[in-house]
Image (cartoon, coloured by chain):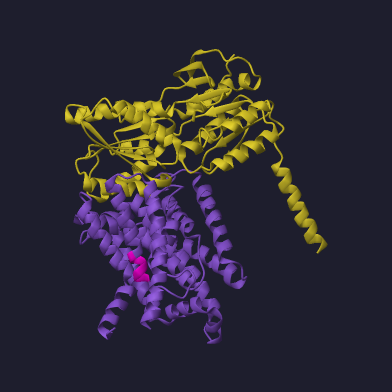
């Protein structure tokens, strides 16, 4: 095999999920009526903003060799906190801050702090107390959702303050600002993972924690930061969710966790840790969103969404093994 | 160390003391098995039942099944062992709970079906508005709205269901489509919002408004799904009234949307009346007395009690809430429980 073919093949292997995305978009555009239009593509990007942001935090922890099952409930709690404070109907208390634009950074900060604190508590138990990440974050998944129910009493908050809701309505180049926030997060965290020592250390920790420790890297500190970041990012996802639905309900975001896992795996992140890049995760999120939209437009029963998601995850894992085999042959 | 142990034991004892049932109640404890607390109708039903049952002398305990059939079955088994005066059941799954209902009745515990009718086995009392009937009322309203807009009952309707695994939403769909069948010029696009999650409904509305911009009416099976639908419409630059909207269950958020002009109709489930009816008949149910068929006045609503194959069934009419009557305090969505004390049926 000549070097040029080898390079081309490696490029395809490295960006396989993007090619898959392109493939499904072309197929859906050709065969599904009304699919091929800018508005639908904007919808795909917009609908993937919450899941996308949540997947970033989850991917960080998985790359570092752990997992976080609490992100969905954390997003719901942040959404409910913002909803209760800044919505004026339902259980919303309609906090009025002047000038109105101040509500944006304050609500965002509240969402991030709520998420960050839960992430920190997860990190403390897992890293300092050496408890199992699966069990600790599963416990958080349950108690945090319970807390959402407790503080809301099962009721919902609506009518988000217009200054915050503005992000869901205003468009830039045809996309709502919430979608741009998600894109900006992917760019920022991709750079963080690829260009900073912290990002590289997380990959190293996920690859071999003991070797990384022996290399003199602060494994515990980095892991706690990773869990805290996952929580804070989930808080941001909750903030976006509140904007998207103009409020918060007690069951908001239910089911997002499994989609986030699916997106991360499809995006090429290894559940064993140490492998994966965030741009691939974004492609995974867009792929799921493109399929959901196709199912919506085809009018297929929603159960098919879950069947297709499951098959996609399976296909992604099989493709991943195929990629590894091919790489070995190329080496 | 001794002091710490004593302090901990003291706190445990205090905690246990607080968990003891209140023996001050005169007529005993009734258990309410609620399917979920993640929706406003269900949380509203807990407070309404508690309020009305207290007025007629019963203490109520609530167990939440988190929409899980197996959990509700276990709860039924646990509650049967506690031998309460009665069990009020709002079943997660109408059929799966049949054996549990039979087991409770075999143990001499009366079972009351609340809001969700179980017709496959007898119960001691059923208080419902009827999920299929809610679909019927919604269909009548849809016909009216389409006629007003298009001059005839024709056009396109987007029906946003709840979770496709929930018989409640499937029954509403059945009732709605049954009545709409007579109008072949109405195209109905039905899509489910998985797990009743609001943002799923928002995505459906956003996608469908692009694929079918001529949609005349959006009918969501719960008010909180309409909220997300409105958010999507707003993001697409629509104003109140551009697309007609309707939802069912009469939750406070739905009433707010009517006031803001987004929602044309909310089909109300008469929550207060359904709960009040349970309290009105509770003495007779507990004492296993005969419930006489006929018309009863339940919080001003004419309700009909019939003897069905599945036992005494009280049907309370649902109502269509529009801009004209939205402030009526009788609607549970206005969160103004009736102040009159419930009187047991003689």
- Please provide percent x and percent y for residue A166: 29, 55
In the rendered image, the vertical position of residue A86 relative to residue A66, given as above or below = above
Quadrant where the N terminus of chain A sits is bottom left
Quadrant where the C terminus of chain A sits is bottom left
In the rendered image, the vertical position of residue A324 relative to residue B150, given as above or below = below
**Is residue B114 left or right of A156 when viewed as pictured?**
right
Q: Residue at x 71, y 31 (%)?
A: B24
Q: Residue at x 28, y 27 (%)?
A: B181
Q: Is residue A281 magenta?
A: yes
- Please provide percent x and percent y for residue B229: 31, 44
Residue closest to the eye, B264 or A226: A226
| Chain colored purple | A
Q: Residue at x 41, y 51 (%)?
A: A83
In the rendered image, the vertical position of residue B169 relative to residue A81, given as above or below = above
Q: Colour of chain B?
A: yellow
> Which residue is outermost to the left?
B151
Q: Main secondary structure of the magenta part?
A: helix
Residue closest to the eye, B165 or B214: B165
Residue closest to the eye, A80 or B104: B104
Q: Does residue B65 show up?
A: yes
In the rendered image, the vertical position of residue B110 relative to residue B228, given as above or below = above
Q: In the rendered structure, which segment of residues is drawn in magenta? A: A278-283
Residue closest to the eye, A229 or A161: A229
């Amino acid at each position: 095999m000549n070097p040029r073919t080898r390079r081309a093949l490696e490029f395809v292997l490295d960006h396989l999920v993007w090619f898959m995305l392109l493939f499904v978009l072309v197929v859906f555009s050709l065969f599904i009526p009304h699919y091929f239009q800018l508005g639908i593509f904007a919808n795909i990007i917009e609908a993937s903003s919450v899941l996308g942001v949540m997947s970033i935090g989850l991917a960080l922890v998985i790359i570092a060799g752990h997992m976080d099952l609490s992100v969905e409930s954390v997003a719901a709690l942040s959404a409910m906190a913002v909803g209760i404070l800044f919505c004026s109907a339902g259980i919303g208390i309609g906090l009025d801050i002047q000038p109105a634009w101040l509500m944006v950074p304050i609500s965002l900060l509240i969402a991030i702090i709520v998420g960050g604190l839960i992430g920190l508590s997860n990190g403390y138990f897992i890293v300092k107390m050496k408890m199992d990440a699966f069990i600790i974050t599963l416990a958080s998944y349950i108690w945090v959702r319970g807390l959402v129910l407790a503080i809301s009493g099962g009721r919902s908050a609506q009518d988000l303050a217009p200054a915050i809701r503005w992000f869901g309505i205003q468009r830039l180049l045809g996309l709502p600002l919430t979608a741009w926030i998600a894109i900006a997060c992917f760019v920022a965290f991709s750079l963080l993972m690829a260009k900073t020592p912290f990002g590289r250390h997380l990959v190293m920790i996920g690859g071999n924690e003991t070797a990384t420790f022996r290399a003199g890297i602060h494994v515990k500190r980095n892991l706690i930061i990773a869990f805290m970041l996952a929580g804070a990012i989930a808080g941001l996802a909750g903030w976006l969710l509140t904007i998207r639905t103009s409020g918060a309900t007690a069951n908001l975001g239910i089911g997002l966790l499994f989609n986030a896992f699916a997106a991360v795996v499809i995006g090429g992140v290894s559940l064993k840790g140490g492998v994966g890049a965030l741009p691939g995760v974004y492609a995974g999120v867009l792929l799921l969103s493109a399929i959901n939209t196709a199912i919506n437009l085809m009018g297929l029963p929603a159960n098919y969404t879950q069947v297709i998601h499951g098959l996609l995850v399976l296909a992604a894992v099989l493709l991943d093994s195929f990629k590894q085999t091919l790489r070995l042959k190329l080496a | 160390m001794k002091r710490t142990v004593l302090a901990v034991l003291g706190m445990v004892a205090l905690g246990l003391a607080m968990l003891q049932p209140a023996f001050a109640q005169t007529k005993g404890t009734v258990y309410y098995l609620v399917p979920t607390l993640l929706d406003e109708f269900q949380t509203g039903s807990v407070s309404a039942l508690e309020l009305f049952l207290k007025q007629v002398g019963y203490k109520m305990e609530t167990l939440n099944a988190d929409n899980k059939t197996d959990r509700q079955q276990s709860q039924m088994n646990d509650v049967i062992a506690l031998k309460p005066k009665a069990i009020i059941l709002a079943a997660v799954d109408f059929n799966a709970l049949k054996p549990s209902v039979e087991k409770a009745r075999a143990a001499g515990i009366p079972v009351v079906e609340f809001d969700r009718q179980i017709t496959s086995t007898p119960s001691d009392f059923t208080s419902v508005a009827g999920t299929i009937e809610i679909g019927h009322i919604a269909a009548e309203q849809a016909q009216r709205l389409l006629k007003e807009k298009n001059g005839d009952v024709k056009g396109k309707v987007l029906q946003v269901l709840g979770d496709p695994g929930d018989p409640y939403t499937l029954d509403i769909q059945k009732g709605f489509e049954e009545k709409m069948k007579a109008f072949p010029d109405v195209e109905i696009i039905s899509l489910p919002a998985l797990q009743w999650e609001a943002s799923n409904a928002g995505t459906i509305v956003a996608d469908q408004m692009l694929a079918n911009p001529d949609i005349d009416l959006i009918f969501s099976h719960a008010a909180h799904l309409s909220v997300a639908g409105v958010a999507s419409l707003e993001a697409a630059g629509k104003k109140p009234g551009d697309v007609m909207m309707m939802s069912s269950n009469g939750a406070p958020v739905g009433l707010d949307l009517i006031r803001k002009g987004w929602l044309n109709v909310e089909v109300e489930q008469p929550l207060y009346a359904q709960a009040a009816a349970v309290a009105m008949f509770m003495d007779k149910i507990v004492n296993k007395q005969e419930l006489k068929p006929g018309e009863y006045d339940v919080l001003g609503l004419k309700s009909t009690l019939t003897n069905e194959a599945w036992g005494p069934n009280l049907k309370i009419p649902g109502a269509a809430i529009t801009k004209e009557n939205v402030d009526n305090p009788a609607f549970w969505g206005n969160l103004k429980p009736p102040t009159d004390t419930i009187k047991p049926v003689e």
